[in-house]
Image: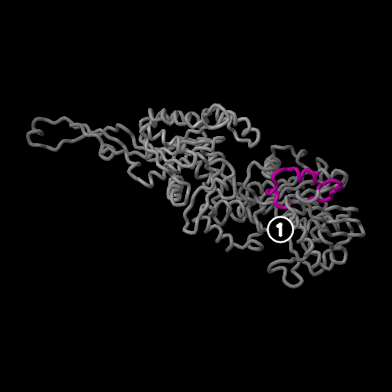
Amino acid sequence: MSNIVVRPPSAPHIDAYKVAVKYATDVILGTIVAGKLLKLTAKRFIQDLKYGPERGITFDRKRAQHVVDFFGTLRHSKGEWGKGGGLPFILEPWQTFILANLFGFLRVDGTRRFREAHIEVARKNGKTTFLSGIGLYMMVADDEPGAEVYSIATTRDQSKIVFDEAVRMRKKSPYLASRVASYRNNLSVLETASKFEPQSADYGTADGKNTHCLIADELHQHPTRLLYDAFKESTVSRTQALCIAITTAGYDTQSFCFTQRKVMENILVGNMSAKDGDAIFAFIACIDDADKDGKGGDNWEDEACWLKANPSLGVTVKLDSLREAAAKAKVDPTALNSFLCKHLNVWTNQEIRWMPPEKWAQCNAAGTFLSPKDLRLAAMEKLKGRICIGGLDLSAKIDLTAFALVFPPIKEVVEKIPKPQTRQQIQFRVPIEFEEKVVSPADPKWSVLVWFWVPEGRIAERVKKDRVRYDVWKNEGYLNTCPGDTINHEFVHNQIVELRKDYQFNDIAFDSWNAQWIANKLKEDGFKPEECRMGYKTMSEPMKELMGIVLGKRLEHYGDPILSWNAGNVSATTDATGSIKPDKEKSKEKIDGIVAVIMALARVCADPTLAQTGSVYSERGIIFL
């Protein structure tokens, strides 16, 4: 560490240790609204201050103060704070807390404890500017000869976002401008042979690099871990290199970034020993999820929880802007997923997820306590003989095909049995009284059963390449297979015909693309196949109907894992009139089961009588005279 105290007199003094301790204490006590994971980070800090020396970890106040003072030399370059010469960079308490952790904790040999950091906060909380400041410090003031600082991203333009901000801050800071030379895509300190450069997957490699500080902005955009790992490996010859990833949540829960997040969670909750996690710092600011039973968790509409994901709320994040985004999410299902992911830091399956996962989960009345396999088998037996409507989404030969049966609600059927009358009652024509006996109980919910098929020869490929659990679903009976490498339409047709032995259905909605042969065959068998195009006009009303049924908890899907997977994958698009439709191109994985359900509901929307039993007895019961 350089002995120079670089904070100019004009910058407000921030006591790094006191601010960090107060922030952690306030988070733990609830004075600062924070999520469960952030509370665990705060507890870890306090515990390490107290018990860290037992395993060789100490806290150096001067080291922490030095980096905080350095930030006093920086000036903002954008927005309301960047006008003129720029306002001084005044660290928020959460930023001071992070810096105190990263630079204050030391090992026995006097080097920094933390070598890797994973930081997740919602957008507009000043991540880029904060990272740029850390990069500048590591280049200028970390007392590391020949320091190499790299900001990395998957594209050149993305990697320059952090770097370009550092260039602008260097220009507005008298302290840095006199010490740091600026060239195209390079900042340099000639005196120490140190540099700061942007690097990306499409420009340059980690070959020959001797990285002292690695900065990965928006790690969720990295498709693989290759770039990050390559630069991380280039730090091995440094005595106290630091790799920092700052990101918002992303849309791909199979990604490298999400895997990193899970590692951090394991460290915070104690699934990894303190010793094994000592070199890794985690700061995850997000709203809380419900537990495995669907209890607890935050309501995203509650403004009180927004601070959990936005530690700079009221400073760089404007409350009015969040309110506008939330209002849009309430009326536009395509905006909800974006609001959750980018403003509340919730990991989701894709960018525009139409179906709220927690609402879908609530449409399995048995919850997680019973096996979905047993539930499905019981439902298939219970629903025998019931009137239903079919929907068929036929694949293009090589992947998932789905056939859905949607069972409308039914009313209670009651036997009215007349009570015996005396001769006198009969003589004076006393009205007959009836005893009622329930013959068939009411079922107020829409029930859904879906049959799925894939080519047998494609299962291994999908499992290996895309990590889709086709093999497990097949073994558990959710997934049927067609012989060979393609979907056999005749095979599917025959199984649909077999289903009519157990369930009452004639109407089958289908998309005419690639399904004309099977539609003609079904018509020959006495079914009533109806074309259902995948456009706004046809799909909007049944999609909204399905959403209403789900939100009202009037759907029962019996925990079908493939259908639930499909539901979480659905991306929806809207037109200028507010009509919606599924978007298979934007949906990152298969949605065929949900599309089949929507098509079946499209038939009901077109002809509401299909949802009626067609029997007067469903209205008034059976009367025995």
Residues packed near mark 1 inside 10 Å, few (<14), some (14 to 19) or many (20 plus): some
**Residue 238 horizontal/vertical position (percent):** 87, 46
**Where, quadrant-wise, is the N terminus in this rendering?**
bottom right
Badge 1 marks a residue whose secondary structure is helix
Image point 25% across, 33% down: which residue? 415
Image point 59% across, 47% down: which residue? 350
Q: Name the residue beneath numbered marker 1.
A: 93
Q: Is residue 399 found left or right of 510 in the rendered image?
A: right
Q: In which quadrant of the rendered view does residue 378 lie? A: top left
Q: Is residue 130 found left or right of 2 in the rendered image?
A: left
**Residue 380 horizontal/vertical position (percent):** 43, 30
**Residue 140 horizontal/vertical position (percent):** 86, 58
Is any part of residue 202 visible from this angle? yes
For the residue marked with disc 1, what is the amino acid? Pro
Image point 50% across, 29% down: which residue? 373
Vertical arrangement, residue 377 with respect to residue 361, above or below: above
Most extreme residue toward the right is 191
Magenta stretch encompasses residue 80: no
Using the image as rendered, state which of residue 542 and residue 281 is in the foreground: 542
Residue span colored magenta:
205-232
Image point 72% across, 57% down: which residue? 128
Magenta stretch encompasses residue 231: yes
Q: In which quadrant of the rendered view does residue 523 lie? A: top left
**Residue 122 horizontal/vertical position (percent):** 65, 54
